[in-house]
Amino acid sequence: MEFNERLQEFREKLKIKKKKDMAKKVGISEQLYYMLESGTREPSNNVIKKLVVMSGLPEEFWIYGITDEKEYLQKREDFKCLKDLVSQLENIGLLNIEGEFTEGVKEVILAAAIADISHLIEKKKQKL
């Protein structure tokens, strides 16, 4: 199943009949939504992240169509949470060259590290 089919199926699961209503829910233009659902345009990282938050489904589902937990463990990029977090902190100006972190930033870094370590542990368990 391709991304556009997963997107359409998700819209239908939400019982949203009009594509323009789904576009509004996702927070993108109607034109972009129509192109995504028709398969004429690939989703940006921003759209993928919005769908992850809305659906509670992992990024790998939206990008690759992965639904099997074992396959997800193998395909998920190691240290994905920390890499995403660093990028986000840079974008909003909360990472500085001196490496000084506020308590809030430290909490978010710890949460990302725990998520990544948990993933690595699960991946190792699967290999046993």
Image (tube, rainbow, N blue to C red):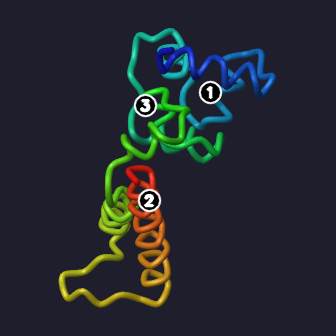
Q: Please, is residue 69 above or below residue 102 in the view?
A: above
- Give the mark nearer the N terminus: 2 vs 3: 3
Q: Secondary structure at mark 1?
A: helix
Q: CA distance from mark 2 to mark 3?
A: 19 Å
Q: Amino acid at mark 2?
A: His
Q: Residue 8 in the image: x percent, y percent?
A: 63, 17
Q: CA distance from mark 1 to mark 2?
A: 32 Å
- The foreground one among 26 and 57 is 57
What crowding class fits label 3: few (fewer than 14 Cα within 10 Å), some (14-19), or many (20 or more)? some
Q: Secondary structure at mark 2?
A: helix
Q: Amino acid at mark 1?
A: Ala
Considering every residue shown, the one lying at the far left of the view is 97
Contact between labelled residues 2 and 1, with CB atoms less than 8 Å apart: no
The front one of 66 and 30 is 66
Q: Which residue is mark 1?
A: 23
Residue 57, x across and y down, in percent? 59, 41
Say what secondary structure mark 3 lies in: helix
Label located before the other in sequence (3 or 1): 1
> Where does label 3 land, which residue?
63
Left or right of residue 123, residue 20 in this image = right
Q: Which mark is residue 119?
A: 2
Alpha carbon of mark 3 to alpha carbon of mark 1: how far?
18 Å
The reply to whether callout 3 and callout 1 are in contact (CB within 8 Å) is no
Residue at left offset 43%, top offset 46%: 73
- 124 sits to left or right of 33: left
Please name whichever residue, 112 or 16, is drawn nearer the observer in this view of the structure: 112
Give the mark toward the camera: 2 or 3.
2
Furthest-front residue in this view:
128
Measured as percent of width and height from the top left, residue 17 is found at: 77, 15
Looking at the picture, does residue 107 appear above or below residue 71? below
